[in-house]
Image (tube, coloured by chain):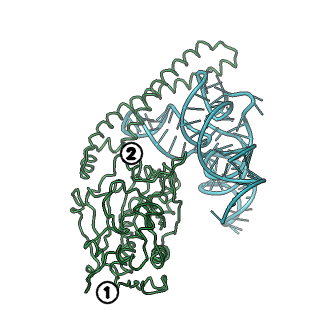
Chain colours: A green, B cyan
RNA sequence: GGAGGAAUACCCAAGUCCGGCUGAAGGGAUCGGUCUUGAAAACCGACAGGACGUGAAAACGUCGCGGGGGUUCGAAUCCCUCUUCCUCCGCCA
C-alpha cells in the first residue's frame, strides 16, 4: 500500500510513476480531497472527545460528593451525539480511502525500462545459446505422453482441464527437483527452509496484494471462513511476520519455501493450453527476504544470482530480462524475469521472477523493524523470487535434454537424486 | 463433533461479580546509579509501545486491557460477535 501522507505531499511524482504502468490513476486526486475532510473531522471529533472525557470524570467526582449531576449529564450526552454523527462520516471516508489505496499498485522504480508490453522488457544477461538439435525435437506434451510420464487424459477425468497426473520417472523428476532446489537454497545459499500452510486467509491475501483487486484469480474454499488455496508461497511466507516488529539483528531474514500453488488463470483462457506450462496447480520453490531498506537492492541482485544458479547447475539456456513498468506485478517496484529456452515455443519462456516490493507489502502487512531498542520502528522491505517454478523446469529439462531416440537425458546434478541418468 | 476454561504492557500477574481519581497494583527481566579491586547480592531510580491528528518546534490531544460492534454521561470491568490458545470426551493420518 502506498503511504497516504507521501501521496498527499508528492502527488505529482506519484501519479507520474503510476502512469508508467498505463491505466488511469486520477481517482487518487479524489482520495486526497477526502483526506483533507478526514483530517478536518478528526480535529473536531478529538476536541469533543477531550471535553467529554474531562466532564465525565467530574460526574464521578460530584456523584461521590452527593451533588446533583443531571444537568451536566445532559450536556455530555449531547456531546456524545455530535461525536457519533461525525464518526459516521469519518468511517465512510476511511473506508473509501482505504479501498482506493488497496487497489492502487506499487510505484514502478524510477530507473526501470519504460513501456507497456513485454516487448519493452530489456534483456540484461544470457546463459548459453538456445539448444540445437540434429533431429526434429518434440514438444513436451508429445514427448511425455510417449514416455508415459505425464497423463493429461486421466487428469481431466479426475479433476478437469489444466490438471496433470505425473507418473513414473515424471513424478520422480518433479519430486527430485523440489529437493534439489530446496537443498541448493537452504544448504548452499543460507535460506531457512519453510513449508507453510497451503490454505491462507483473506488478511494474508490482502497483505501481499492479491486482494482485493485479483480475487478472480484465487480458488476460494467453500466454507464459512474466508479461506483460499495458496496462489504462491509469497503469500503464506511474507505473512509469517504480519503485525510483527523485528529486531535489527534478525534482518535480513531469508526463507526458501516449497508450496503447491493454485491459480484460476482467469485472464488466460486459451493461452498455453497444451502441456503443463499453465496449470491450475503447480509446485514452486520460492525465495523470500525481509531486509532493511538500504540493503534491499543489493539483496535483490543476490537473489537473482541464487535463482539463476538453479538453471546454471541444470545447464539450461536462459536469459534475464528487466521488466518494463507496464509488465510489472501489482505489488512490485522492480522485477527481473528469468526466461528459459523452450524448443516447443521456439522462444524464451518465463520460469521465475525476482522482485522487490520495497515497503509496499510491509505497509499492508504491518511488518516493521527497529534499528535499536529505542529507535522508531520502520517498515522492512520484502523481496520474493522463484527458485524456481518446478513444473516449468520439468518442461525445460524434457525439451532441452531430449534425444534422437525419444529418451530424455537427466542433467548431471540430478542423477544422484533421480538414481538414473535417463528417462526412457 | 460435544463439554468446559483462558486471553491485561517485554515476561509473569492483580483488577472483571459490585462501571467512575486504574492507562492499569505487584513481581521478574532490562537500562541507569550507590556500594565493591571487579562481580554477585542489597539498596535507589527509570520503564507501554505504537498509530493518528494539530503544530515551525517544544508540546498537546485522540485511540489503546485478544479483534470488531453495542449499552452508558463514563467500560479492562456489562451485553453481542469473531479469533486464538488450553483441558476433557469422541473421531481420525
Residue A59: where, in percent of width, then height? 62, 20
Indicate the quadrant containing the C terminus of chain A: top left, top right, bottom left or bottom right: bottom left
Indicate the position of residue A72 as horizontal and vertical percent values. 58, 15
Q: In this figure, which residue is indicated by the disc labeled 2?
A: A102
Label whose residue precedes the other's in the sequence (1 or 2): 2
Question: Does dot 1 land on a helix, a strand or a loop?
Answer: loop
- Residue at position x 48%, y 63% from top? A158
> Total label count?
2
Q: Along the line of sight, which residue is nearer the eye, B15 or A122?
A: A122
B19 over B48 or under it: above or below: above
Density class for disc 1 (Cα within 10 Å; few <14, some 14-19, many ≥20) is: few
What chain letter is assigned to the residue under label 2? A
- Residue A404: mark: 1
Which residue is more in the foreground, B45 or A230? A230
Could you say which disc has been placed on residue A265 in the image? none
- B25 versus A120 height, above or below: above
Mark 2 closeness class: few <14, some 14–19, many ≥20 residues within 10 Å: many
Relative to A408, B34 lies left or right: right
Q: Position of residue B81 (x, y in %)?
A: 60, 37
The answer to whether one can see residue A387 in this image is no
At a point 38% along the width and 61% down the height, the residue shown is A294
Tell me the residue at 70%/15% (across/down). Answer: A66
Closest to the observer: A382 or B9? A382
In the image, A48: left or right of A324? Answer: right
B2 left or right of A267 in image: right
Amino acid at each position: 500500500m502506498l503511504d497516504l501522507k507521501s501521496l498527499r505531499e508528492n502527488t505529482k511524482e506519484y501519479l507520474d510513476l503510476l502512469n508508467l504502468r498505463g491505466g488511469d490513476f486520477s481517482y487518487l486526486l479524489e482520495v486526497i480531497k477526502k483526506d483533507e475532510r478526514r483530517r478536518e473531522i478528526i480535529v473536531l471529533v478529538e476536541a469533543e472527545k477531550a471535553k467529554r472525557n474531562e466532564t465525565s470524570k467530574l460526574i464521578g467526582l460530584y456523584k461521590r460528593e452527593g451533588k446533583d449531576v443531571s444537568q451536566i449529564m445532559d450536556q455530555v450526552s449531547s456531546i456524545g451525539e455530535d461525536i457519533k454523527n461525525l464518526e459516521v462520516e469519518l468511517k465512510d471516508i476511511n473506508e473509501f480511502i482505504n479501498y482506493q489505496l488497496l487497489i492502487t499498485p506499487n510505484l514502478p522504480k524510477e530507473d526501470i525500462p519504460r513501456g507497456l508490453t513485454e516487448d519493452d522488457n530489456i534483456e540484461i544477461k544470457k546463459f548459453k545459446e538456445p539448444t540445437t538439435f540434429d533431429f526434429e525435437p518434440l514438444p513436451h506434451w508429445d514427448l511425455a505422453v510417449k514416455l508415459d510420464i505425464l497423463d493429461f487424459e486421466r487428469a481431466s477425468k479426475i479433476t478437469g482441464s489444466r490438471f496433470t497426473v505425473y507418473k513414473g520417472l515424471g513424478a520422480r523428476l518433479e519430486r527430485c527437483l523440489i529437493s534439489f532446489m530446496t537443498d541448493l537454497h537452504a544448504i548452499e545459499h543460507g535460506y531457512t527452509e519453510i513449508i507453510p500452510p497451503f490454505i491462507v486467509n483473506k488478511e494474508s491475501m490482502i497483505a501481499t496484494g492479491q486482494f482485493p483487486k485479483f480475487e478472480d484469480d484465487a480458488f476460494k474454499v467453500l466454507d464459512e471462513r474466508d479461506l483460499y488455496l495458496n496462489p504462491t508461497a509469497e503469500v503464506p511466507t511474507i505473512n509469517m511476520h504480519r503485525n510483527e516488529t523485528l529486531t535489527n539483528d534478525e534482518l535480513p531474514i531469508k526463507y526458501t519455501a516449497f508450496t503447491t500453488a493454485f491459480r484460476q488463470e482467469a485472464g488466460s483462457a486459451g493461452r498455453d493450453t497444451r502441456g503443463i506450462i499453465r496449470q491450475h496447480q503447480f509446485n514452486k520453490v520460492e525465495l523470500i527476504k525481509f531486509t532493511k531498506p538500504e540493503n534491499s537492492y543489493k539483496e535483490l541482485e543476490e537473489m537473482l544470482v541464487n535463482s539463476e544458479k538453479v538453471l546454471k547447475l541444470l545447464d539450461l539456456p536462459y536469459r534475464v530480462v528487466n521488466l518494463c513498468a507496464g509488465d510489472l506485478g501489482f505489488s512490485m517496484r522492480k522485477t527481473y524475469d528469468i526466461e528459459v529456452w523452450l524448443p516447443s515455443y521456439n522462444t524464451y519462456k518465463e520460469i521465475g521472477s525476482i522482485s522487490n516490493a520495497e515497503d509496499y507489502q510491509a505497509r499492508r502487512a504491518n511488518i516493521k523493524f527497529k534499528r535499536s531498542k529505542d529507535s522508531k520502528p520502520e517498515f522492512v522491505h520484502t523481496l520474493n523470487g522463484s527458485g524456481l517454478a518446478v513444473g516449468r523446469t520439468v518442461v525445460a529439462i524434457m525439451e532441452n535434454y531430449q534425444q534422437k531416440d525419444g529418451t530424455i537425458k537427466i542433467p548431471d546434478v540430478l542423477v544422484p537424486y533421480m538414481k538414473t541418468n535417463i528417462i526412457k
